[in-house]
Amino acid sequence: MSKKNFLKICSVILGGILVVLVFSQIPVYDLFIAEKTIAGDDDNISGWAWSENIGWVSFNCNNPELSAPRCNKDYGVNINDATGKFSGYAWSRGTDADEGGVGWIDFAPTGPYPGAPNYSVCVNLPNISNEVCEADLLKGQIGGWARVVSSGEWIKLRGTNYGVYVDKTTGEFHGWAYGGESMGWLSFNCVEGGDCGDSDYKVKTALSFNSAPDKPGIDLAYPEGESLSHCSFQGKSIPSFYWTYSDPETNPQIGYEIWIDDDPGFLDPKFNNLVEASASTAYTLDLSQDDECPGDCWLSNLAWNTTYYWKVKVTDDIDDPSHWSEWSDVNSFATPKHAWPWPDFAPSPVHPGVNGIVHFIQNGAFPHEDYKSLCYAGGEHLCEDDSNVVYEWDIGNGQIPDICDIDINCRGNATTTYTAMGTYTIKLTITDTTLPGTCSRSKPINISLPFPIWEEIRPQ
């Protein structure tokens, strides 16, 4: 673009002294370039637009079609990835080697604007609050005003029956802007004119327009948002959490972060976990966390008879740290007063036969010291020693034992005899009425023919 600097010399007589005044008559846009500080390498928009009236408009000094050295005049247009607002300057270089253009075009001019809308160029981006832009996010629409620096003429990016938008998948701009009668229509992509031919021009951005996932909701299968498993691990009630996932572009979930605390403000979360690569919309507290702290931390110090609060946020499979959803609403759950019963037992003998007596040991008696039914009201103890505990034995096919050690309700060990071979399922159910809470354990037992009785017979 040829730019001419004209010197205008004027002479005046001041106090009998001839004073020569020299004025530099430089176009406004040439003066402006010295103040411009936006670096082309830092701008996320590049490429070319075309107008029949003003010719080519370059959006970045690093456009490869420009002759080297590029960016001797450092310019470019940028979209702020936090606000969606445009900034920077494009260069109208005319139709042929810097001839006939209008110079600098400011994409963040200040008002007052010539009409609605009352803001400079912008696009709605995901997760932006309190930003005004009439553009439709899902359609990638762009709106607002740009302005020619030298003349002050305005370019409108969206109006009735026209406008510019960006393809959120390719980053290519499409559509038309209007600069009034003098500048006319500005095309942002050659495809709008039909066959691009040798003029394959377009404006494009490297900014990702992928929307963050929607705020997680509550899975209708779990109206409270969580469930507690009281019987799956000895001495603990394990919470699981459930949420819904949706994404405007239907991109899959790839990770989530969940926080748990006894303070709804989450100032010092008792537990927080980031799962980097999971499409699951459920999470059960990881018992391995207990292995990382001294003693029995029970999932990072969860306590009994306490109300806890939790929240979750999710991210999609786009590699961008801004693509996390909002936090879910804060939900709460309460741990029980103490752990639920832990039924356990073993048959003695281990391989019983038909018509043989079988004992089901659940109090750690010899030879099954490791098999104990434990309850927890007031501290860990044998369930058979607790009068608030109810036993229910099923020795197979719904049958009750023949003999119970402690009372007629079969609290304690049980004894029975099987009169037929087969595999039987033994089930012990224990209810702690102080909770109330009930847990069961089932085990199979094989009843075989009794061993033969060997009798030595003297040869005849």
Image: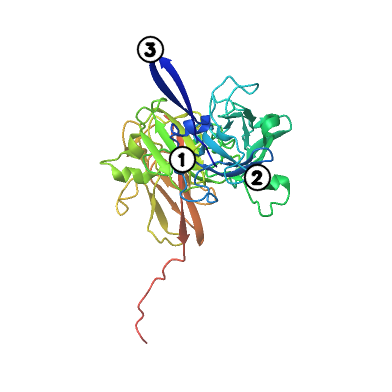
Q: In the current view of this chain or complex, which residue is farthest to the bottom?
A: 460
Q: Classify the position of the N terminus by image quarter.
A: top right
Question: Label 3, on which residue?
Answer: 15
Residue 196 x, y percent position in the rendering: 69, 51
Q: Classify the position of the C terminus by image quarter.
A: bottom left
Secondary structure at numbered mark 3? loop
Nearer to me, 127 or 177: 177
Q: Nearer the viewer, mark 3 or mark 1?
A: 3
Kindly identify the amino acid type of the residue bearing the numbered disc 2: Asn
Q: In the current view of this chain or complex, which residue is farthest to the front?
A: 16
What's the residue at 48%, 57% (across, down)?
418
The earlier-in-sequence mark between 1 and 2 is 1
- Corner quadrant of residue 215: top right
Kindly identify the amino acid type of the residue bearing the numbered disc 3: Gly
Q: Nearer the viewer, mark 2 or mark 3?
A: 3
Question: Label 2, on which residue?
Answer: 189
Mark linked to residue 74? 1
Secondary structure at numbered mark 1? loop
